[in-house]
Image: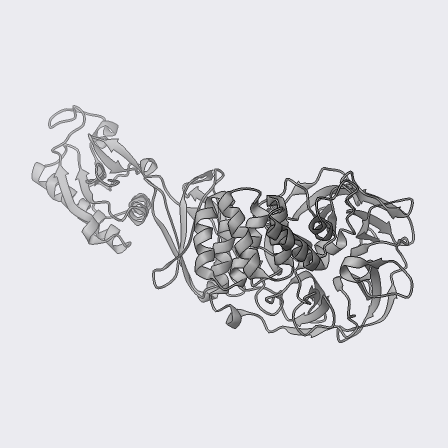
Amino acid sequence: MNKAKKIQLAFLAALLGTVFCFGQKKSKGDDFFFQYKYPQAITAYEAQMTEGTLSEQQFLNLADSYFETNNFEKASEAYLELYKKDTLMGGHHFNKMLQSISKTSNTERKNAFLTTMSSSFPKELMENMEFNQQLLGNNAEESSLDYQIFNLAENSPQTDFAPSFYKDQLLFTSGRLRQKGNRYEPGNEDYFNIYGARLQPDGQISDIQTFAELPSSNYHKATPYYSEGLESVFYVLSNTEDGELAFDANGKNALAIGKQVIGDSFQLLLKDLSTSFYYPFYDEASGKLYFSANFENGYGGTDIYYVYTNSGQVMSAPINLGPRINSPGNEIAPFIFEGSFYFASDVFYGYGGMDVYKSNMEGESFSIPINLGKGINSTEDDFGLIMRNEGEGLLGYFASNRPGGKGKDDIYGFQLDEKPGLKTITFRGKVVKPYNTSEVVDKVAVQLWDVNGELLAVTYSDEEGNYRIEIPWVEEVVLESSKDRYSQFTKRFTQSDLEGKETLDFDIGISLYDDLVEEKEGQMVVKMKKFLFGNNRTQLTPEIEAELDKVVEFIKGFPSAQLRIETYTDSRGGSSTNFRLTQSRSDAIKQYLIEQGVPSSNILYSVGYGEDKILNNCTNGVFCLEMLHQQNQRSLVVVLNDNILFD
C-alpha cells in the first residue's frame, strides 16, 4: 500500500475499527471496501464492472477506492462520470472529485467545474477558497516563517500521530507493534494506543512508555488531550461491551470520547454506535469541549463540533462550527492557542491532502481560516498541530506522512519565534453616524485598496453596523466606505500604522445627507445653528467658525456638492451699506471655508443680499423688537445641485 495514503485511511478509516456487516454481502468488493482493503476492493469492483453487475453505489465505492490509493486519474474520471448523472454525489464527494482533478494538474478543468458548482456550495466556502488562493499566490513562500522542523527520532515504522503536551511529557498515539495485543488488519499494525515520553531540551523525546493513567483496553485508544485545570485526559476509544467491540445495527464499530481524571475516575462523555468522534480538545477558558465527528447532517465527511460542559461534564447537544470552519472535506484536530483556532482540513484548495489552517476567534465567530503555508504544510497530509510557549519562542508538534519519514505517519517538531501562519491584516469595527455614534449604519460597502488603486477586498456592514475585512498583509492600504445618500469615507493606513498588528479595530463614521441638510426659504441648505455677526462687523467669531466647520465636514463627505453662500441683514441702516456689509460677510465665510480645505471650485457663488429679503414686517420705518430684526440677519450655505447630486 502506498506510504503516502490519505489521512482518511491513516486516521479516519483506521480509527473506525473493523467493520462487519452481518447481513448478506452484495459482493466481494463490498467486503473489501468496508474493511478498508482498497486495493482488493478495486480488483473486485473492476471485475464486477467487466461483468456488468456494478451498481452506482458500488461505482462510487470504486471511485473512493481509487482516491484512497492515490490513483487520482481514475478517481477523477469515475467521480466525473457520476457527477454527470447527478446521483449519489454530495459535497463530500465533490471535494474528492476536485482534489483528484487538482492532483492530475488539470487546473483549468477544476476551475471550470468550480464555476458550475459554486452555487451549490456555501458562500463562506467560496470566500475561504478565494482568500486562500490569493494568499498562497501572494509570495507565500517568501512570506512564510523560518521553521526549524525536525522528525522525532523515536517515530516507529507504523503510524505515530496526535501529539499532546502532558506536564513535562509528550503524549501521542501510535500503532507501533507490541509483544502482546490484537493486530488491526487494515493497517497491519497494533490497535492504536496512547504513549507518553519525556520531552528533551532539544524537542526530541525519550523513555517511551504506554500511558498507564488510562484504563486498559484491547482496542483503539487515541488522540489524547490533557487539561491541566481539570487534571484530566480526554481521548477517543473504541466502543466496547463487556470488553469486546460493540457494533451498531449495520455492523459498524465507532469511536467514543472519554475523560480520565488522573489518578481517579473514568467517565464516558460522548458515545453513538453509528458515529465516530475524533480529536477532543477542552478549552478551559470557555468550558467548551471541541471534537470532530462524522454526523450525517454535517457539511462534509467529518466536521468540527463543540458541546458546552460543566467542568468537562457534557451539558448540551453537539453544535456544528458552521461553514466558515467546516467544508465538504474532512475537518479534524481542533486546537486553540492565544486566541487562534487551529485545525486540519483536506478541502480541495489546499496544498494537497490535509493542511493545517488558522482562524482567529472573535467572540462566537471565526475569521477566514488561513493556510499555514509551506513548512508545516506539504503536498501530503499534515494535521494535529499543537504548540506552547517555550523559552523565548514556541515549541510545537504535528503529524505528517510527507516523504522522508520513518513510518506511515510521523510526528514532527518545530521551533519558532512567533505564531505560525502566513501574515494577514484584519480591519473590524462598526459603521456609525459621527454626530450620533449610537446610531449604526447597515449595508455599507467597506473596501480596501492598495496604493496603486487596485481593489483588494470588499464587504458590507451587517444589521448592527459591524464590518470585518481581512487581506494578506500589505505595507500600506486605503480604507473606503460608501452607501447611497451617505458621505464618502477614506483613510490611508501606512506601514507604521499596520506594523506588528494582526487585527486593527477601527470604527467608520459616515453621515446621511438628509441629516446634514434642511429646507429653508424654498431651497436646500447645509444645516447649521443660526449665528450672528457683531454689529456692523465682518469678523468671524469662534462660534461662527464652529458652525462653518459643519460645512467643511459636509464637503469632505459630499465632495461633488456645489455651494452658494448667501448673507442677509435687517432693514436698519442704508441699503447700499447693507449690501456691502453682507457681501463682505459672505466673502469672509468663503475665505474661511477655503482656508479649512474646501476647494474654491465647490463654492460657485458668494453673495450679499443686504436687506432685499426681509422675512417679516420689519421693513424700513417699522418699529420692531431686536429679536424680530435678528430674524432677518442670517447666513445660508445653499446646495445648488441638491436635486441631481445622487443621480
Q: Residue at x 66, y 66 (%)?
A: 4
Question: In the rendered image, which quarter contains the N terminus?
Answer: bottom right
Total marks shown come to 0
Towards the viewer: 440 or 355: 355
State left or right for residue 584 relative to residue 95.
left
Single out the residue that lies furthest toward the front.
Answer: 51
* Up/down of 250 relative to 382, above or below: above
Residue 488: % across, % down: 34, 48
Does any portion of residue 629 appear in the rendered image? yes
Residue 402: % across, % down: 65, 69
Query: Which picture quadrant has residue 185?
Result: bottom right
* Up/down of 49 relative to 23, above or below: below
Question: In the rendered image, which quarter contains the C terminus?
Answer: top left
Q: How is the image coloured?
A: one colour
Single out the residue that lies furthest toward the left.
Answer: 576
State left or right for residue 25 relative to residue 536.
right
Residue 401: % across, % down: 68, 67
Towards the viewer: 147 or 435: 147
Query: Which picture quadrant has residue 404?
Result: bottom right
State left or right for residue 102 relative to residue 228.
left
Towards the viewer: 14 or 174: 14
Does any portion of residue 283 appear in the rendered image? no
Residue 619: % across, % down: 13, 27
Towards the viewer: 452 or 381: 381
Query: Which picture quadrant has residue 634?
Result: top left
